[in-house]
Amino acid sequence: MFDIFYIGPKPNLFPFEKEVNNITEAQQLTRTDYCWIVNTYNDYSGWDFLWQPDPWEATHQHVFPSQWQRDSGTYLIPKQEITDVNYRTECLVTRQRPTTDVVLIDHLDNNVSNAKILIENKVKIAKTTKFVDNYLDTLIRIANTATSEYIWVCSSVCNYTDFDFTWHPEPWQQEMLHVFPSGEQKFGDTFYMHVPTFKKNAPQCQLLDWYNNNFCNDQRVPRYKLPVVHHKHDSHVSALPERQQEPLVVYSNTHMWYDTIPDVALWRKETRTILPVNKRGSTVIVPRDAIGKIKEQLWDYEFVAQEEFPGSSDPLDVIFLENGEVNAEENWNHLKDVALAMKPNKLKRVTGVKGRVNAYRAAAEASTTPWFYCVFAKLKIDQNFDFSWQPDCLQQAKHYIFHAENPINGLKYGHMAMIAYNKKLVLENTAPGLDFTLDQAHEVVPMLSGVANYADDTFMAWRTAFREVLKLKHQLSKGPDVDTDYRLRVWLTRGEGDKGEWSKIGATDAVEYYQEVNGDFDKLKLSYDWDWLTQYFHSQNT
């Protein structure tokens, strides 16, 4: 039988076992050709302490593995000088019990009771402490009050059903902070800490990321499922509470669901981002920190994830809106050809609805999606337009105006362009202003939606220019604007093609009418009425 020594807590394996500080001291004290160094946390049931190496390995240090590492803290040491280290693989020592106590961090997520039960079935919980603003400060506070050399730090957001607290690091990693991933999140919520080292070095770090961390993949700790708030608002802002207890909550306004909800890093405020789960952001993870800082849109919060959204969203319906335009059939057939390529989007046609407002509402009612692409009959859709585009549910509900090319005067802006209308806003719109779309929240998306062929007949060319110039004049009455002033001058002076002259005439008639009625809003709003426009056109041009 060889002498047996231990480093650290006494294992109580043999009456003659002795404590040493290191391998060299064991070599000096042993009375046998070899000696064992054992670890108190290992199970040596059935272990062959009479084992000895082959003669050619007589001067090697023999290191035996555990189920976790190639170094279990079990060594056979020669009395004479060590010439090599031999990591054995044929014998495994089972690490039987955890090396230390646990501190449980309470994230105020209603899971702390479950976590306590799961953990205490395996290892003692020394104390529970509340999470502060970030993990660095929380871990420093824990280290300053810890009484053990090593501790586990666990979190109430994690499910420890399958976690094995017998894990231990390699000897050369003893002083590192070991971080276990939460699901697929590398910056996890479970730590194995060497307290004296952390107390000394952590206060020198501005971020926990900069500490001497070992990101382990030996075990992954799943988090508990996040609470989900399903709602019917087009913007998540309307569904947010005044206070949110849980550190993270999923908000969703879509019937679609995703197999995987990403794990947001909780390490500090900058990593606890608002995270859209799909392209539209109709499903989004919102941190507790953001509540109270969001007023009109989720983008009010300073930390929003910018990476590509992994999930998909329902494609928007495409509504072709027609009201007697000469080129309607040609543009409809072209749109159908483009629709064959885009496939997921449903295509519908709304025709012959009298009145501009009624036509918009009919288009909205025909849509089955919260937003819909409205393609006006004058517009020949760009065959390269990306119909997978999605509105942003992180913002307030609004309309999105794309660009269109005007072949008569060369302008490219939102006039006559395709619009992604919000269905609820359209149905609520009472058209108080001169422009139905601009009367409500809107945003310009600088994507070319197509070419607006509005001059296929005389009246259409005149009518389109007349209505647009009235809007431009009304807008300028509110204050100077460089873009608006430029567009007005172009409408009045440029007119290419056979009907281009009628576009300029319509613009000129609009300026004269605006001056005639002195900008009276009620008189300007008559331009919403197709019958009035027809009568005024004939009165001016006969």
Image (spheres, rainbow, N blue to C red):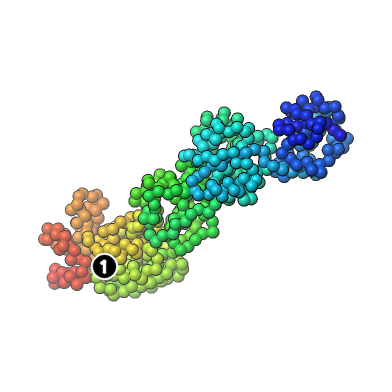
Determine the image quadrant of residue 218.
top right
Q: Position of residue 229 (x, y in %)?
A: 44, 57
**Foreground of the two, 35 or 259:** 35
**Foreground of the two, 523 or 221:** 221
Quadrant of the rendering where the N terminus is positioned: top right
Q: Position of residue 29 (x, y in %)?
A: 81, 25
Is any atom of residue 159 visible in this view? yes
Looking at the rendered structure, the secondary structure element under dot 1 is: helix
Q: Is residue 93 above or below residue 225?
A: above
| Image-based side of 231 in relation to 33, left or right | left
Name the amino acid, label 1.
Answer: Val
Q: Residue at left 46%, top 68%?
A: 343
Residue at the extreme right of the image, as rendered = 55
Q: Residue at left 75%, top 42%?
A: 43
Is any atom of residue 210 visible in this view? no
Q: Residue at left 42%, top 69%?
A: 346
Residue linked to disc 1: 357
Q: Is residue 391 above or below residue 274?
A: below
**Foreground of the two, 165 or 392:** 165
